[in-house]
Amino acid sequence: MSAPSISIEAMSKRYGTIAALDGVEVHIDSGRCLALVGESGSGKTTLLHSVNRLVSPDRGTVRIDGRPVDDWSPEALRRTIGYVPQHGGLLPHWTVERNVALVPRLLGYSDATRRARAALGAVGLDPGEFSQRWPRSMSGGQRQRVALARALAADPGLVLLDEPFGALDALSRADIQRLFLDLREARPFTAVLVTHDLREAFHLADDIAVMRDGRIERHGSVADVRARPDSPYVEALFERAGVAP
C-alpha cells in the first residue's frame, strides 16, 4: 500500500470539563513521520487515536488521502492502519506467529502465515526460532519487535505508534529505534509517533508537533522547530529536556 497523507481538521474533544483537543489542525505529508510530543495530558494520545477512530471527536475531521475516516467502519479502517500500543498489546494466549498474522488473516489473505514470518524476519526475529514461542517467554525488547512485526505484516501505508519504546531499557530502546529507522528506509510508510522523549522525537521523526492543553503550540520540521522554538513554552520544554538549540 502506498504511504498516504493525513489531514486533521478542526479536531476537538472534551472529557467533561477537560478539553483534550481544542481545534487541532495538522497535516502529515505522504511518507513522513510526525512526532507528537508534550507533557502528560496535552492531548497526544487522544489525537493519535482520532486517526484510527479509537476516539470519536466532538468536532473535526481526519482525512486519509483526502477521504474522511468516517467513510470506513472502525473495524475496516483499523485493518488498513498499523498500530503499536504502548506495551505492545500482544495476545498472551496466542503464539508469536499467530499474533503477527492477525491482520492479514482478518483481511482474508491466503498467505497470512508467510506474511507473518516475513514480518518477523524484517524486525530481526528468526521465524524458525520465534514463531511458536509465547509472548511471556520473550524479553521486553523482543515483544516490542513482535508488536512492530504485527503492525507491518499487512504492509500498511500508515502506522501509528503510542509510546512504543518507553518501557524498554536504554540498550533495547536504542536497538528498536535503529530498527524503526531501518524499517522506514526499507519500506516507506507514513507514521505518527507519540513520545514523551524529545531526543527520541528528534532522532526518529521528520516533523514534530508540540502539544499543550489540547492545542498544537508549535509544528514544523524537526530541524526548524529545534532551531526556532518560537514559543516561550516550547523553549522551556526543550531546555528542561536538555535539547535546547
Image (cartoon, rainbow, N blue to C red):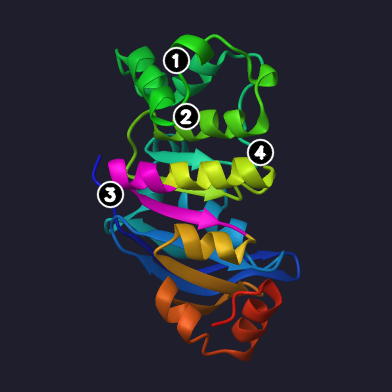
| Residue that numbered label 3 is attached to | 3
Residue at screen point 70% across, 19% down? 136
* First to last magenta residue range: 181-195
Q: Where in the figure is residue 63, as x and y percent of width and height?
A: 35, 58
Which is nearer the eye, 177 or 101? 177
Q: Amino acid at mark 4?
A: His
Q: Where in the figure is residue 104, as x and y percent of width and height?
A: 38, 23
Looking at this view, name the residue that lies furthest to the right: 17
Answer above or below: position of 84 versus 227: above
Q: Amino acid at mark 3?
A: Ala
Which is nearer the eye, 197 or 67? 197
Answer above or below: position of 60 versus 2: below
Determine the image quadrant of residue 149. top left
Of the two numbered discs 4 and 3 on the same chain, state the one appearing first in sequence.
3
| Residue that numbered label 2 is attached to | 150
Q: Could you say whether the residue bearing mark 2 is in a helix, strand or loop?
A: helix
Name the mark on residue 87.
4
How far apart in space, not on screen, are marks 3 and 2 (Cα)? Answer: 18 Å
Is residue 30 shown left or right of residue 179? left
